[in-house]
Image (spheres, rainbow, N blue to C red):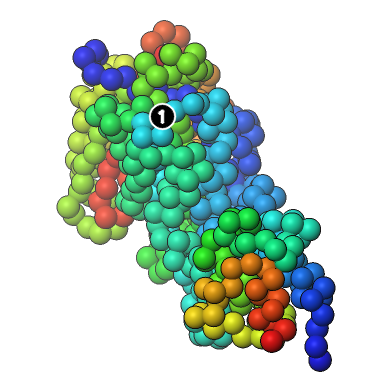
């Protein structure tokens, strides 16, 4: 392992997901194998072919006071809820403001704000638009608000790489600290895209499951009967910190954020590259960046979205780049797919799996698909071995973005 | 139908509370929106639009910037 550069550790976790309003309730639901997917009850549901989604378990209006909430897009609300939890979990550290940064992105940004504001504009004219419409719709809005919230003056950034956004944000945060620019970064992703236009558009790609008679069985990564992803919403945000800074203040450390690997497919704007070579490259690069060997990796939180095209290719890539030995799980089977939030919550799940040495099982794998030669955790949570171990979170996005983030035990 | 200063003050207090979370009881005539109540220019636009709905008095943008205190708004609405 590399010893001559800044080591980055994880000192705080925050999330709001379809399984719970915080990290503890979400993690407990994952270990219990519960699904956060529910039938949609909105009046527009008849206009779309998919009638279920993973709505957040706790409505943000129950957490954020109304005067604040009305100037925030729903995705920004999720991001602020998760970042405040993560910041408190880290002990609300005293950080020199110019040494504190934020990297929080969203795949789509303030899409519900855009659509609602356009309705207002058409019906009532421009004078009735909220003066906060622009900061609500811009995809960097969440990062900006979090920066104000914690007083981050070292740089506030927003990654945008579709479903790889949250993982890319964490990768960028690791690099910010390693570069010496800052000591602490709040990083992750958020998404609030449960809207008929999004569901209709993803359905037009034939990317979504239409298992309307069994919503909780619809997200089934690695299963032969999978028929598409299930839309989720929420946010997952971590506090990254240089090990020196964390040790100096006696912080609790969950894991080491050991490295990040990026690649891009240059193949198709929305379809996975069928050889999986791009995905492999991201995983090979994360091993190199973290100074780890494939044998060190005991667990992979797979991107596996439950679409027919992606899941098996990813498992083959894991076998090629890391090996057949890691315990692989797809937590999207329970949370649904949080798009830009996925890499945030799934990095948290990867960190907790290492920290507690247990991997949540993928649910709904009744009939493992052909060609899967890695060890899929299913039916019940799996124990991870003692000693110094590592794990990888994969996140891939439309546009051909491949991101792998590695964590190790402390 | 003329509204009294007290009625306008109560209405403004409610609007400002709804938009900014500041307690309505803090909204008193001598208070400056920027210096005392810490209300930014974007929120002032929201308050002006809501006041327009409530009291039927349109506040043009070139007038809004001259309305520094709660009393200024009350006087504008009464004028």
Q: Is residue A233 above or below residue B53?
A: above
Per the image, label 1 sits on a secondary structure element best described as loop
Q: Is residue A91 above or below residue A236?
A: above
- For label 1, count other residues whose C-alpha is less than 10 Å away and answer few (under 14), some (14-19) or many (20+): some
Q: Who's the residue at 55% across and 25% down the image? A: A91
Foreground of the two, A168 or B75: B75
Image coords of residue A335 (percent x, y)? 54, 44
The N terminus of chain A is located in which quarter? top left
Residue at the spot of label 1: A96
Relative to residue A361, is residue A371 drawn left or right?
A: left
Q: Who's the residue at 66% across and 81% down the image? A: B76
Foreground of the two, A246 or B68: B68
- Residue sitting at the far top: A387
The C terminus of chain A is located in which quarter? top left
Relative to residue A265, is residue B51 drawn left or right?
A: right
Res A212 seen here:
no
Residue A259: image quadrant is: top left
């Amino acid at each position: 392992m590399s010893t001559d550069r800044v080591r980055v550790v994880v000192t705080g976790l925050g999330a709001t997901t379809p399984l719970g309003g915080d990290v503890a309730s979400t993690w407990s639901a994952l270990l219990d194998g519960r699904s956060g997917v529910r039938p949609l009850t909105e009046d527009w549901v008849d206009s779309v072919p998919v009638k279920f989604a993973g709505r957040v378990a706790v409505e943000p209006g129950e957490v954020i006071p109304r005067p604040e909430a009305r100037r925030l897009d729903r995705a920004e609300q999720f991001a602020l809820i998760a970042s405040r939890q993560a910041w408190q979990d880290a002990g609300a550290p005293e950080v020199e403001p110019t040494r504190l940064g934020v990297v929080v992105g969203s795949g789509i940004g303030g899409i519900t704000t855009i659509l609602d504001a356009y309705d207002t504009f058409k019906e009532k004219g421009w004078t009735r638009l909220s003066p906060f419409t622009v900061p609500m719709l811009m995809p960097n809005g969440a990062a900006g608000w979090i920066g104000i919230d914690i007083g981050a003056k070292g740089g506030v950034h927003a990654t945008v790489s579709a479903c790889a956004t949250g993982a890319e944000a964490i990768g960028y945060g690791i690099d910010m600290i390693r570069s010496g620019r800052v000591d602490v970064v709040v990083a992750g992703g958020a998404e609030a895209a449960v809207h008929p236009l999004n569901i209709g558009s993803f359905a037009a790609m034939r990317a979504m499951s239409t298992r309307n008679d069994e919503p909780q069985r619809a997200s089934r990564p690695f299963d032969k009967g999978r028929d598409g992803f299930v839309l989720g919403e929420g946010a997952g945000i971590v506090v990254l910190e240089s090990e020196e800074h964390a040790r100096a203040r006696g912080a609790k450390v969950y894991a080491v954020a050991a490295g990040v690997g990026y690649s891009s497919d240059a193949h198709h704007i929305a379809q996975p590259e069928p050889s999986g070579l791009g995905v492999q490259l991201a995983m090979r690069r994360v091993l190199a960046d973290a100074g780890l060997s494939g044998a060190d990796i005991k667990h992979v939180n797979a991107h596996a979205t439950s679409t027919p095209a992606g899941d098996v290719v990813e498992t083959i890539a894991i076998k090629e780049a890391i090996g057949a030995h890691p315990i692989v799980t797809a937590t999207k089977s329970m949370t649904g797919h949080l798009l830009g939030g996925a890499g945030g919550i799934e990095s948290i799940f990867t960190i907790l799996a290492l920290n507690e040495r247990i991997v949540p099982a993928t649910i709904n794998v009744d009939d493992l698909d052909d060609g899967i030669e890695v060890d899929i955790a299913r039916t019940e949570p799996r124990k991870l071995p003692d000693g110094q171990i590592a794990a990888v979170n994969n996140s891939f996005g439309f546009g051909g973005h491949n991101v792998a983030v590695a964590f190790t035990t402390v | 139908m003329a509204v009294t200063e007290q009625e306008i003050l109560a209405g403004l207090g409610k609007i400002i509370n709804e938009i900014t979370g500041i307690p309505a009881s803090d909204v008193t005539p001598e208070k400056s929106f920027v210096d005392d109540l810490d209300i930014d220019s974007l929120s002032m636009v929201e308050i002006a639009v809501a006041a327009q709905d409530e009291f039927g008095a349109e506040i043009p943008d070139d007038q809004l910037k001259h309305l520094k205190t709660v009393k200024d708004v009350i006087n504008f609405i009464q004028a």
